[in-house]
Image (cartoon, grey):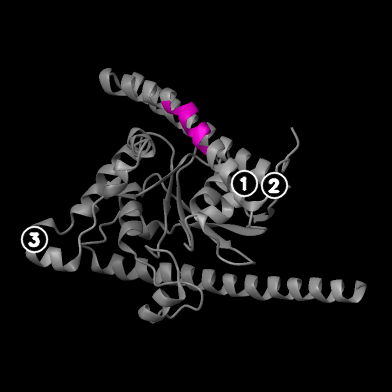
Amino acid sequence: MRLSMFNFLPYWLRGTLASLLVIANTFFWFPFLLFGTFFKIVIPIRFIQKLMTQLLITIANAWVSGNSFVLSLTQRINWVITGTDNLKKNDWYFVNSNHQSWTDIPIVQKVMNGKTPMLKFFLKQELIWVPVLGVCWWALDFPFMKRYSQQYLKKRPEMKGKDLETTRKACSKFKTTPVAVLNFLEGTRFTNKKHDKQQSPYTNLLKPKYGGAAFVLGSMGEKMHTMLDITIYYPDDTPGFWDLLCGKVKNIVVDVRKVNIPIALRGKDYSQDKVFKMEFQHWMETVWQEKDELLGQLKVKHAQISEASVSGALEQS
């Protein structure tokens, strides 16, 4: 079957077809996922539970591969991917990425699938009610976090730190099986409005939120030695998820950089150790500044490529 075989279809039909194929792929693997989850719950034997966990991860990776195949069938994207060599499926990684769109997640999944352990990320508590996917995330031990506003915490100060306790509990499960923990440090999708409201010191990024990342490294320090710093850039425009399904995304740039996590920043308590807190923030600020500069370089580079393409087309005409 030739890749991009449905690329000739109009956008709306391509998007509809891609959506139906993704849904079909999800419902195909869903019974297998429930089967593994059932045995994982009802048989409290450590060996069986570990075996079922491996089975569930294999099923989830197959689901991701299916979704990536759907994209390759329905559209033609020019991928520029660098830095994915020499990654290991049996190691632990902290994965950090900038965040611009809901398309970021399937893109990171596609790029990392088969090269690292399964990606897991923290989800809002409300997402557990998403039909089918909510159950899948729960079965795969994705941590659900309930975030509290500052106003709520003033009224209920005893709830302060509950989200961090959830992080600790989730990380205790991550220690038994290799995992890649994905974190969007910005905490929300980048928009110019949010950037201006924050008065962010970075040109292309929002201010990073350190707590979640620091607690992951604090809990997983003896296992997690490497951070994969992913930078996603859309040369044409930041797309929505429907744009991706419709084939409107023509170019995607993904840069993966391996960064050694300093020993001094592993296995410490971010909430209690003030020296560690300052050192961690300083380290992340350096990483974030380099990412901001890389995004700026990518913008200039692809703007020049676009200008050259336009000039060449004008000359030929």
Question: Does residue 24 belong to the magenta stretch?
Answer: yes
In the rendered structure, are the residues bearing label 2 and label 1 in contact, judged by CB atoms less than 8 Å apart?
yes
Image position, residue 26 (x, y; %): 48, 33
**Residue 198 higher or lower than 174, as above or below:** below
Which numbered marker is on residue 13? 1
Q: Which of pointers 1 and 3 lies earlier in the amino acid sequence?
A: 1
The quadrant in which residue 238 appears is bottom right
* Image depth: mark 1 or mark 3 in front: 1
Q: Nearer the viewer, residue 32 or 91?
A: 32
Which numbered marker is on residue 9? 2
Disc 2 and disc 3: Cα gap in Å? 54 Å
Question: Does residue 157 belong to the magenta stretch?
Answer: no
What residue is at 45 percent from the left and 32 percent from the top? 57
In the rendered structure, are the residues bearing label 2 and label 3 in contact, judged by CB atoms less than 8 Å apart?
no
Q: Which residues are magenta?
A: 22-30
Image position, residue 239 (x, y; %): 55, 61
The three-letter code of the residue at mark 2 reads Leu
**Is 219 placed left or right of 298 in the picture?**
left
**Is 182 placed left or right of 46 in the picture?**
right
Question: How many neighbours does mark 3 have within 10 angstroms: few (below 14), some (14-19), or many (20 or more)?
Answer: few
The three-letter code of the residue at mark 3 reads Arg
Image position, residue 184 (x, y; %): 42, 59
The three-letter code of the residue at mark 1 reads Leu
Name the secondary structure under disc 2. Answer: loop
Residue lying furthest right: 316
Quadrant position of the N terminus in the picture: top right
